[in-house]
Image (cartoon, rainbow, N blue to C red):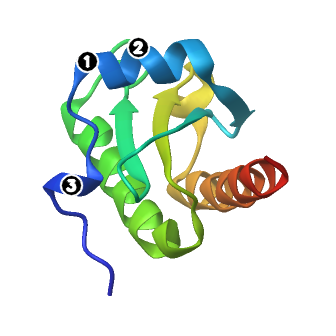
Amino acid sequence: MAKFGRAMKMSNPRDYSRVFHQAKRSSTGGLTILTAENSAGHPRLGMAIAKKHLKLASRRNQLKRIIRTSFRQHQSVLANIDIVVLSRNDISQCELAQVLLALERHWQTVVAQWQKS
């Protein structure tokens, strides 16, 4: 099983800014995924799950765990890109199964976008 270590996380605010300004976007299922090329040699994940979209910390943390797990399962097919996952207003109405399906579609879209480039 693939790991999600420190190297797989985006932690520098400059990296987040770069992704926000240069991003390719994919948006469905209560989530928006922004991607931009990186020089790290592997995909990295960042998350911005808004408190105004999911009021309970337990729900926000549960969503983050699901996103990390899904990323870990797909990181071998992803290019050298930085990925930022953002929550949207409609995330609070989504069931966890719907979020997993939306993430599957997002990863397929991301792979397709970066194979063209």
Mark 1 secondary-structure assignment: helix
Q: Position of residue 103 (x, y in %)?
A: 61, 54
- The amino acid marked with disc number 2 is Ser
| Tag 1: amino acid | Pro
| Quadrant in the rendering for residue 30 | top right
**Mark toward the start of the polypeptide (3 vs 2):** 3
Identify the residue position indicated by label 1 in the image: 13
Task: Please name the amino acid that badge 3 sits on.
Answer: Ala
| Left or right: 76 in relation to 59 | right
Between the residue at mark 3 and the residue at mark 2, the CA separation in whole angstroms equals 18 Å
- Mark 3: give few (<14), some (14-19) or many (20+) Cα within 10 Å: few
Residue found 35% across the figure and 57% down from its top: 68
Residue at figure coordinates x 57%, y 62% from the top left: 78
Residue under circle 2?
Answer: 17
Specify the quadrant that holds the N terminus.
Answer: bottom left
From this view, report whether residue 56 is shown above or below residue 104. Answer: above
Looking at this view, is 21 or 52 the one in front? 21
Mark 2 to mark 1: distance in Å? 6 Å
91 lies above or below 94:
above
